[in-house]
Amino acid sequence: MKNIARWTSLFLTAACIAANSGIATAEPYPSRPVRLVVPYAPGGTSDLLARYVAQKLSEAWSQPVIVENRAGAGTVIGSSGVAKASPDGYTLLMTNNTHVINPQVMASVPYDPLRDFTPIARLASSPYLLLLNPSVPARNLQEYIALAKRQPGKLNFGTGGPAGLTHLGGELFNAMAQVNITMVHYKGAAPLTAAALSGEIDAYLDVPATTRQLVEGGKLRAVGTTGRERVATMPEVPPVAEAGVPGFDVTISYVVLGPAGLPAAVREKIDNEIGRILAQPEVQQRLQSLELTPFPGGSAEVANWLKAEQEKYGKVIKTARIKAE
Protein backbone atom coordinates (compact mmCIF):
# COMPACT_ATOMS: atom_id res chain seq x y z
CA MET A 1 0.00 0.00 0.00
CA LYS A 2 2.87 2.32 0.82
CA ASN A 3 4.34 1.72 -2.65
CA ILE A 4 0.97 2.41 -4.27
CA ALA A 5 0.60 5.63 -2.29
CA ARG A 6 4.16 6.61 -3.14
CA TRP A 7 3.69 6.02 -6.88
CA THR A 8 0.34 7.81 -6.81
CA SER A 9 1.98 10.80 -5.16
CA LEU A 10 4.78 10.83 -7.73
CA PHE A 11 2.28 10.55 -10.58
CA LEU A 12 0.22 13.47 -9.29
CA THR A 13 3.35 15.57 -8.78
CA ALA A 14 4.50 14.86 -12.34
CA ALA A 15 1.06 15.68 -13.69
CA CYS A 16 1.06 18.99 -11.85
CA ILE A 17 4.51 19.85 -13.19
CA ALA A 18 3.43 18.99 -16.72
CA ALA A 19 0.25 21.03 -16.38
CA ASN A 20 2.12 24.02 -14.98
CA SER A 21 4.69 23.70 -17.78
CA GLY A 22 1.86 23.71 -20.32
CA ILE A 23 0.39 26.82 -18.77
CA ALA A 24 3.78 28.50 -18.83
CA THR A 25 4.34 27.76 -22.51
CA ALA A 26 0.82 28.75 -23.60
CA GLU A 27 1.70 32.42 -23.62
CA PRO A 28 -0.46 34.97 -25.44
CA TYR A 29 0.59 35.57 -29.03
CA PRO A 30 2.87 37.34 -29.70
CA SER A 31 5.17 37.04 -26.71
CA ARG A 32 8.40 37.62 -28.64
CA PRO A 33 9.54 39.35 -31.87
CA VAL A 34 7.83 38.42 -35.15
CA ARG A 35 9.68 38.21 -38.47
CA LEU A 36 7.90 39.49 -41.57
CA VAL A 37 9.81 38.15 -44.58
CA VAL A 38 9.70 40.18 -47.80
CA PRO A 39 11.10 38.19 -50.76
CA TYR A 40 12.23 41.39 -52.50
CA ALA A 41 15.09 43.84 -52.15
CA PRO A 42 14.64 46.93 -49.93
CA GLY A 43 13.14 50.11 -51.34
CA GLY A 44 10.31 48.85 -53.52
CA THR A 45 6.58 49.06 -52.89
CA SER A 46 6.52 45.62 -51.24
CA ASP A 47 9.23 46.67 -48.81
CA LEU A 48 7.68 50.06 -48.02
CA LEU A 49 4.26 48.53 -47.40
CA ALA A 50 5.71 45.76 -45.23
CA ARG A 51 7.66 48.20 -43.08
CA TYR A 52 4.65 50.44 -42.55
CA VAL A 53 2.37 47.54 -41.58
CA ALA A 54 5.13 46.06 -39.38
CA GLN A 55 5.43 49.35 -37.52
CA LYS A 56 1.69 49.41 -36.87
CA LEU A 57 1.66 45.79 -35.70
CA SER A 58 4.60 46.48 -33.37
CA GLU A 59 2.69 49.37 -31.80
CA ALA A 60 -0.45 47.27 -31.38
CA TRP A 61 1.27 44.21 -29.93
CA SER A 62 4.08 45.89 -27.96
CA GLN A 63 6.40 43.38 -29.63
CA PRO A 64 8.86 44.07 -32.45
CA VAL A 65 7.72 43.02 -35.92
CA ILE A 66 10.95 42.90 -37.90
CA VAL A 67 10.98 43.11 -41.70
CA GLU A 68 13.54 40.78 -43.21
CA ASN A 69 14.35 41.24 -46.91
CA ARG A 70 15.26 37.88 -48.45
CA ALA A 71 15.39 38.56 -52.17
CA GLY A 72 16.60 36.15 -54.80
CA ALA A 73 15.55 33.41 -57.22
CA GLY A 74 12.34 35.21 -58.13
CA THR A 75 11.02 35.28 -54.51
CA VAL A 76 11.77 31.56 -54.00
CA ILE A 77 14.50 32.09 -51.37
CA GLY A 78 12.35 34.12 -49.02
CA SER A 79 9.19 32.11 -49.62
CA SER A 80 10.85 28.73 -49.11
CA GLY A 81 12.28 29.92 -45.80
CA VAL A 82 8.80 30.73 -44.54
CA ALA A 83 7.38 27.43 -45.85
CA LYS A 84 9.96 25.56 -43.73
CA ALA A 85 9.50 27.71 -40.61
CA SER A 86 7.69 26.58 -37.48
CA PRO A 87 3.93 27.24 -37.80
CA ASP A 88 3.75 29.35 -34.66
CA GLY A 89 3.09 32.80 -36.14
CA TYR A 90 6.58 34.16 -35.52
CA THR A 91 7.65 33.87 -39.17
CA LEU A 92 5.32 35.43 -41.75
CA LEU A 93 5.55 36.24 -45.46
CA MET A 94 4.34 39.33 -47.28
CA THR A 95 4.09 38.57 -50.98
CA ASN A 96 1.97 39.22 -54.06
CA ASN A 97 0.66 37.54 -57.23
CA THR A 98 4.09 36.18 -58.10
CA HIS A 99 3.66 33.67 -55.28
CA VAL A 100 1.41 31.53 -57.50
CA ILE A 101 2.98 32.56 -60.82
CA ASN A 102 6.63 31.61 -60.26
CA PRO A 103 6.03 27.91 -59.55
CA GLN A 104 4.31 27.67 -62.96
CA VAL A 105 7.22 29.13 -64.93
CA MET A 106 10.22 27.74 -63.04
CA ALA A 107 11.69 24.30 -63.54
CA SER A 108 11.69 23.51 -59.83
CA VAL A 109 10.34 25.24 -56.72
CA PRO A 110 10.79 23.64 -53.27
CA TYR A 111 7.24 24.31 -52.10
CA ASP A 112 3.63 24.29 -53.21
CA PRO A 113 2.32 27.89 -53.16
CA LEU A 114 -1.07 26.83 -51.81
CA ARG A 115 -0.53 23.63 -49.82
CA ASP A 116 2.60 24.76 -47.94
CA PHE A 117 1.23 28.10 -46.69
CA THR A 118 -1.60 29.40 -44.50
CA PRO A 119 -3.49 32.38 -46.01
CA ILE A 120 -3.89 35.09 -43.39
CA ALA A 121 -4.84 38.54 -44.68
CA ARG A 122 -4.94 40.90 -47.65
CA LEU A 123 -3.34 44.32 -47.36
CA ALA A 124 -3.58 46.48 -50.45
CA SER A 125 -3.63 46.45 -54.22
CA SER A 126 -2.56 48.57 -57.16
CA PRO A 127 -3.44 48.42 -60.84
CA TYR A 128 -0.98 49.15 -63.59
CA LEU A 129 -1.29 51.84 -66.20
CA LEU A 130 -1.15 50.92 -69.88
CA LEU A 131 1.36 53.49 -71.09
CA LEU A 132 2.32 54.57 -74.61
CA ASN A 133 5.21 56.60 -75.88
CA PRO A 134 3.67 59.86 -77.22
CA SER A 135 5.01 59.08 -80.70
CA VAL A 136 2.53 56.17 -81.01
CA PRO A 137 -0.36 57.46 -83.17
CA ALA A 138 -3.10 56.45 -80.74
CA ARG A 139 -4.85 58.84 -78.41
CA ASN A 140 -6.85 56.24 -76.52
CA LEU A 141 -7.19 52.50 -76.01
CA GLN A 142 -9.56 51.91 -78.91
CA GLU A 143 -7.15 53.61 -81.32
CA TYR A 144 -4.23 51.59 -79.89
CA ILE A 145 -6.09 48.31 -80.42
CA ALA A 146 -7.12 49.33 -83.95
CA LEU A 147 -3.50 50.24 -84.74
CA ALA A 148 -2.28 46.89 -83.44
CA LYS A 149 -4.82 45.03 -85.55
CA ARG A 150 -3.77 46.93 -88.69
CA GLN A 151 -0.10 46.14 -88.02
CA PRO A 152 0.08 42.63 -86.49
CA GLY A 153 3.50 41.93 -84.96
CA LYS A 154 4.89 45.41 -85.69
CA LEU A 155 4.09 47.15 -82.42
CA ASN A 156 6.16 46.16 -79.41
CA PHE A 157 5.40 45.92 -75.71
CA GLY A 158 8.09 46.21 -73.03
CA THR A 159 8.19 44.04 -69.92
CA GLY A 160 10.25 44.05 -66.74
CA GLY A 161 11.46 40.54 -67.53
CA PRO A 162 10.13 37.24 -68.85
CA ALA A 163 7.41 35.57 -66.79
CA GLY A 164 6.86 38.65 -64.59
CA LEU A 165 3.44 40.18 -64.05
CA THR A 166 4.06 42.93 -66.64
CA HIS A 167 4.90 40.23 -69.20
CA LEU A 168 1.86 38.13 -68.31
CA GLY A 169 -0.28 41.25 -68.41
CA GLY A 170 0.95 41.99 -71.93
CA GLU A 171 0.24 38.45 -73.09
CA LEU A 172 -3.21 38.56 -71.48
CA PHE A 173 -3.87 41.82 -73.34
CA ASN A 174 -2.79 40.15 -76.61
CA ALA A 175 -5.22 37.29 -76.01
CA MET A 176 -8.20 39.28 -74.79
CA ALA A 177 -7.88 42.17 -77.27
CA GLN A 178 -7.13 39.70 -80.09
CA VAL A 179 -3.99 41.48 -81.21
CA ASN A 180 -0.41 40.41 -81.88
CA ILE A 181 1.98 42.79 -80.13
CA THR A 182 5.62 41.69 -79.79
CA MET A 183 6.99 41.32 -76.25
CA VAL A 184 10.42 42.87 -75.54
CA HIS A 185 12.03 42.00 -72.21
CA TYR A 186 14.19 44.23 -70.03
CA LYS A 187 16.02 43.54 -66.78
CA GLY A 188 13.84 45.47 -64.39
CA ALA A 189 11.74 48.60 -64.17
CA ALA A 190 14.47 51.23 -64.65
CA PRO A 191 15.68 50.14 -68.11
CA LEU A 192 12.08 49.46 -69.12
CA THR A 193 11.02 53.02 -68.29
CA ALA A 194 14.08 54.41 -70.07
CA ALA A 195 13.16 52.42 -73.18
CA ALA A 196 9.61 53.74 -73.09
CA LEU A 197 10.71 57.35 -72.69
CA SER A 198 13.20 57.08 -75.57
CA GLY A 199 10.67 55.50 -77.91
CA GLU A 200 12.56 52.21 -78.07
CA ILE A 201 9.31 50.49 -77.13
CA ASP A 202 5.76 51.54 -77.93
CA ALA A 203 3.96 50.48 -74.78
CA TYR A 204 4.32 48.88 -71.36
CA LEU A 205 2.68 48.45 -67.96
CA ASP A 206 3.81 50.25 -64.82
CA VAL A 207 2.27 51.29 -61.51
CA PRO A 208 0.87 54.82 -61.05
CA ALA A 209 3.24 55.51 -58.14
CA THR A 210 6.27 55.64 -60.44
CA THR A 211 4.72 57.00 -63.63
CA ARG A 212 1.99 59.49 -62.73
CA GLN A 213 4.34 62.48 -62.93
CA LEU A 214 5.66 61.29 -66.30
CA VAL A 215 2.10 61.12 -67.61
CA GLU A 216 1.22 64.53 -66.18
CA GLY A 217 4.38 65.95 -67.77
CA GLY A 218 3.41 64.62 -71.19
CA LYS A 219 6.36 62.21 -71.41
CA LEU A 220 4.08 59.17 -71.46
CA ARG A 221 0.44 58.68 -72.45
CA ALA A 222 -1.84 56.60 -70.20
CA VAL A 223 -4.65 55.00 -72.22
CA GLY A 224 -6.00 52.67 -69.55
CA THR A 225 -5.72 51.36 -66.04
CA THR A 226 -5.62 47.60 -65.62
CA GLY A 227 -7.81 47.45 -62.50
CA ARG A 228 -11.57 47.33 -62.29
CA GLU A 229 -11.85 50.92 -61.08
CA ARG A 230 -10.25 54.24 -61.95
CA VAL A 231 -7.16 55.40 -60.08
CA ALA A 232 -8.17 58.08 -57.57
CA THR A 233 -5.32 60.41 -58.57
CA MET A 234 -5.91 59.89 -62.32
CA PRO A 235 -9.70 59.72 -62.73
CA GLU A 236 -9.47 60.65 -66.41
CA VAL A 237 -7.83 57.30 -67.27
CA PRO A 238 -10.49 54.63 -67.88
CA PRO A 239 -10.13 50.95 -66.93
CA VAL A 240 -9.02 48.81 -69.87
CA ALA A 241 -12.06 46.61 -69.16
CA GLU A 242 -14.33 49.62 -69.63
CA ALA A 243 -12.55 51.15 -72.61
CA GLY A 244 -12.32 48.19 -74.97
CA VAL A 245 -11.32 44.85 -73.40
CA PRO A 246 -14.19 43.63 -71.18
CA GLY A 247 -13.09 41.53 -68.21
CA PHE A 248 -9.44 42.58 -68.36
CA ASP A 249 -7.93 42.78 -64.87
CA VAL A 250 -4.23 42.76 -63.99
CA THR A 251 -3.81 44.02 -60.46
CA ILE A 252 -0.86 43.54 -58.15
CA SER A 253 -2.08 42.68 -54.66
CA TYR A 254 -0.19 42.20 -51.41
CA VAL A 255 -1.06 39.44 -48.95
CA VAL A 256 0.30 38.00 -45.70
CA LEU A 257 0.86 34.25 -45.44
CA GLY A 258 2.27 31.93 -42.81
CA PRO A 259 3.60 28.37 -42.89
CA ALA A 260 1.09 25.56 -43.33
CA GLY A 261 -0.48 24.42 -40.08
CA LEU A 262 -0.70 27.84 -38.45
CA PRO A 263 -3.14 27.61 -35.51
CA ALA A 264 -6.51 29.19 -36.25
CA ALA A 265 -6.34 31.41 -33.15
CA VAL A 266 -3.00 32.88 -34.23
CA ARG A 267 -4.17 33.33 -37.82
CA GLU A 268 -7.32 35.12 -36.66
CA LYS A 269 -5.41 37.41 -34.31
CA ILE A 270 -3.08 38.54 -37.10
CA ASP A 271 -5.94 38.93 -39.56
CA ASN A 272 -8.09 40.91 -37.11
CA GLU A 273 -5.25 43.25 -36.19
CA ILE A 274 -4.39 43.92 -39.84
CA GLY A 275 -8.06 44.61 -40.56
CA ARG A 276 -8.17 47.08 -37.67
CA ILE A 277 -5.02 48.80 -38.92
CA LEU A 278 -6.30 49.11 -42.49
CA ALA A 279 -9.50 50.75 -41.25
CA GLN A 280 -7.59 53.67 -39.72
CA PRO A 281 -7.90 56.91 -41.75
CA GLU A 282 -4.20 57.74 -41.36
CA VAL A 283 -3.26 54.31 -42.71
CA GLN A 284 -5.57 54.72 -45.68
CA GLN A 285 -4.03 58.11 -46.43
CA ARG A 286 -0.55 56.64 -46.23
CA LEU A 287 -1.45 53.83 -48.63
CA GLN A 288 -3.02 56.30 -51.03
CA SER A 289 0.24 58.28 -51.00
CA LEU A 290 1.87 55.09 -52.32
CA GLU A 291 -0.90 54.83 -54.94
CA LEU A 292 -2.22 51.74 -53.12
CA THR A 293 -5.83 50.92 -52.29
CA PRO A 294 -6.53 49.24 -48.93
CA PHE A 295 -7.71 45.74 -49.78
CA PRO A 296 -8.69 44.04 -46.49
CA GLY A 297 -9.77 40.44 -46.44
CA GLY A 298 -9.32 37.33 -44.33
CA SER A 299 -8.04 33.84 -44.82
CA ALA A 300 -10.86 32.60 -47.04
CA GLU A 301 -10.64 35.62 -49.35
CA VAL A 302 -6.87 35.23 -49.67
CA ALA A 303 -7.17 31.52 -50.43
CA ASN A 304 -9.80 32.11 -53.13
CA TRP A 305 -7.81 34.98 -54.63
CA LEU A 306 -4.61 32.91 -54.82
CA LYS A 307 -6.43 30.05 -56.54
CA ALA A 308 -8.06 32.41 -59.04
CA GLU A 309 -4.75 34.13 -59.86
CA GLN A 310 -3.04 30.76 -60.26
CA GLU A 311 -5.68 29.62 -62.73
CA LYS A 312 -5.86 32.89 -64.67
CA TYR A 313 -2.15 33.23 -65.28
CA GLY A 314 -1.71 29.48 -65.67
CA LYS A 315 -3.79 29.70 -68.86
CA VAL A 316 -1.68 32.60 -70.16
CA ILE A 317 1.57 30.77 -69.33
CA LYS A 318 0.43 27.63 -71.11
CA THR A 319 -0.90 29.40 -74.20
CA ALA A 320 2.15 31.66 -74.63
CA ARG A 321 4.58 28.91 -73.51
CA ILE A 322 6.23 31.21 -70.99
CA LYS A 323 9.24 30.11 -68.99
CA ALA A 324 11.42 32.06 -66.56
CA GLU A 325 14.99 32.64 -67.68
Image (cartoon, rainbow, N blue to C red):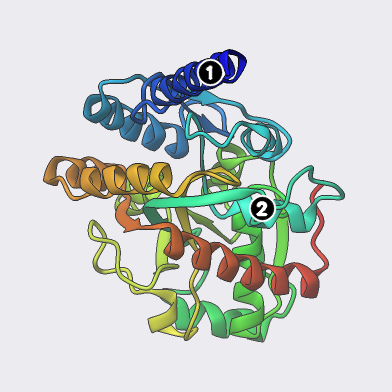
Instruction: Identify the image quadrant of residue 202.
Output: bottom right
Q: Residues within 10 Å of mark 1 (few under 14, many from 20)?
A: few
Rendered location of residue 269, percent (x, y) = 33, 43
Type of the residue with mark 2: Pro
Q: Looking at the picture, does residue 50 appear above or below residue 68? A: below
Horizontal side, residue 63 vs residue 227: left or right: left
User: Mark 2 falls on what kind of element?
Assistant: loop
Tell me where residue 152 appears, x and y as whole percent. Answer: 72, 80
Q: Residue 113 carries which label?
A: 2
**Which quadrant of the rendered structure holds the N terminus?**
top right
- Tell me the CA gap for discs 2 and 1: 56 Å
On the image, which quarter does residue 114 sit in?
bottom right
Marks 2 and 1 in Cβ contact (< 8 Å): no
Circle 2 or circle 1, nearest the eye:
1
Q: Is residue 159 above or below residue 148?
A: above
**In this orientation, which residue lies closer to the viewer: 311 or 169?**
311
Please determine whether, in this image, residue 229 is positioned above or below residue 13.
below
First in sequence, mark 2 or 1: give its number: 1
Q: Is residue 87 rendered to the left or right of residue 318?
A: left
Where residue 178 is drawn, which disc sits there?
none
Label 1 secondary element:
helix
Residue drawn at (14%, 40%) of the image: 282
Instruction: Decide if residue 301 is in sight here.
Output: yes
Q: Give, as a three-letter code, the residue at label 1.
A: Ala
Is 48 in front, or is 84? 84
Please tell me the numbered disc located at residue 5. Answer: 1
Which residue is at 29% across, 52% downward? Answer: 216
The residue depicted at 35 percent of the width and 19 percent of the height is 64
